[in-house]
Amino acid sequence: MLYSKYRSPCCGRAQELVISRDGGFVTQNCIGCGRPRYVGIGELPVIECDICGLAMQAGTRNRNYHYECPCCDNGFPLWTRLSRWSERFAECGIAVPSELG
Ligand SMILES: [Zn+2]
Ligand SMILES: [Zn+2]
């Protein structure tokens, strides 16, 4: 599980990074109320390289966030380390009219 660097403005809670859409689009969802927000690159957490332990550098590749180690060849798209949104949150906090019956 990975979290944004910043707490949510709605609840003051941590915000978990999740896969929001197919194709690897990532959002940060408030763990208090589930509200999703867009994640800026400056909000991404520091991840240590599994191989050499250095802080990896976050960037983008094919319009998805991508981590690369500055020291070795280790690298991966961020979304491969995340859960799907629907596995983590029961609702998004924004009612969709068609779901209200
Ligand atoms: Zn919230
Ligand atoms: Zn490394």
Image (cartoon, helix red, strand yellow):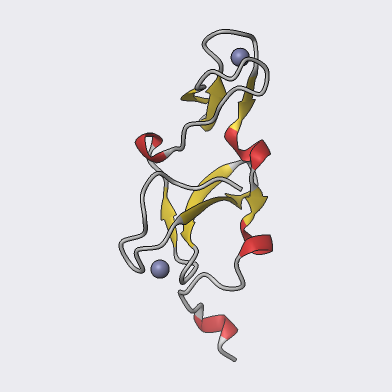
Q: In this picture, is 46 found above or below 33?
A: above
Q: Which residue is found at the position 50% from the left and 48% from the top?
A: 3
Horizontal and vertical percent position of residue 21: 60, 51
How many circles with numbers are drawn on the protein?
0
Outermost left residue: 9
Residue 79 visible in image: yes
Confirm whether residue 62 shows in the render.
no
Q: Quadrant of ligand 2?
A: top right
The picture places residue 11, in percent across and down from the top left corner, at: 36, 68
Q: Is residue 51 above or below residue 82?
A: above
Which of 40 and 46 lies nearest the eye of the viewer? Answer: 46
Residue 20 coordinates in the image, percent (x, y): 57, 53
Left or right: where does residue 41 sit relative to residue 86? left
- What's the residue at 30%, 62% (across, down)? 9
Identify which residue is drawn at 44% across, 57% down.
14
Which residue is at the front of the view, 57 or 37?
A: 57
Q: Is residue 36 above or below residue 41?
A: below
Relative to residue 55, is residue 92 depicted above or below? Answer: below
Which quarter shows the C terminus? bottom right
Residues 17 and 91: in front is 17
* Quarter of the image where one finds residue 51: top right
Q: Residue furthest bottom?
A: 101
Task: Left or right? Give the position of 74 relative to 48.
Answer: right
